[in-house]
Image: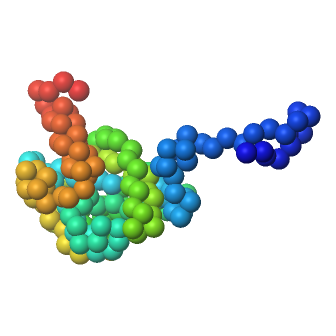
Amino acid sequence: EEGRPCPFVSKPRRLRQSKATRLGIMSESLPPPVPAVGVVCLRGEEVLLIRRGAPPRLGEWSLPGGRIEPGEGVRAAALRELREETGVEARLIGLIDVVDGIFPDAGRHYVLIDFVAEWISGEPVAGDDAADAAFVSVQRALGLVTWSETRRIIEQAVSFGRVGEPGNCA
């Protein structure tokens, strides 16, 4: 396919598609990715979950989190979202992973920056766009959560949390 002439070359150049477009990974129907945070909040052998009260994944159990506000740092956003959705206070202890949340049915693409946190205070009370919030055993959490990426993040966070405990290598 012929493209626009390049000002530095006398003959027209060929336009190349990105690798993602050629592989059919990209979708022109989705808006640009939105940066967001998620928090795996651990309290002993329990993990804090929320039931989503808004799309995407409406009604499903997930991690507290949400969009990063303009000018807000990622760590501040993680703690704010945790507080807004659950009323819980925690201390971030590490970055777990960065995950693409691509939800074509909801017309959304998030870049999810997931942290692990240690519970400090507060009992979970659903707030903001969470329909429910609760600390549950890690095993139960892995059974309640349907998205495989969230289950993977929880498993990694639990392993990370155990590394940081006294007597374990950091």
Which residue is nearer to you in this view: 157 or 93? 157
At which x and y percent is residue 92? 30, 46
Q: Colour scheme used in the picture?
A: rainbow
Q: Quadrant of the C terminus?
A: top left
Q: Which quarter of the rendered picture does the N terminus lie within?
A: top right
Describe residue 98's horizontal placement relative to residue 43 as left or right.
right
Please state if 159 lies on the left or on the right of 136 as rendered: right
Q: Residue shown at 55%/44% (left/top)?
A: 22
Q: Residue at x 33, y 74 (%)?
A: 54
* Residue 108 visible in image: yes
Asked whether the viewer can see residue 89, the reply is no
Q: Position of residue 65 (x, y in %)?
A: 33, 60
Instruction: State the residue at coordinates (28%, 61%).
Output: 64
Label tally: 0
Outermost residue, top side: 169
Residue farthest along the right direction in this orientation: 10
- As drawn, 65 above or below 126: above
Q: Is residue 103 above or below residue 22?
A: below
In depth, the one of 25 and 11 nearer the eye is 11
**Percent position (x, y) of residue 24?**
49, 49
Rendered image quadrant of residue 130? bottom left
Q: Residue at x 22, y 36 (%)?
A: 160
Figure check: 51 above or below 149:
below
Point out residue 85 in the picture as x, y percentages from the top left corner: 29, 68
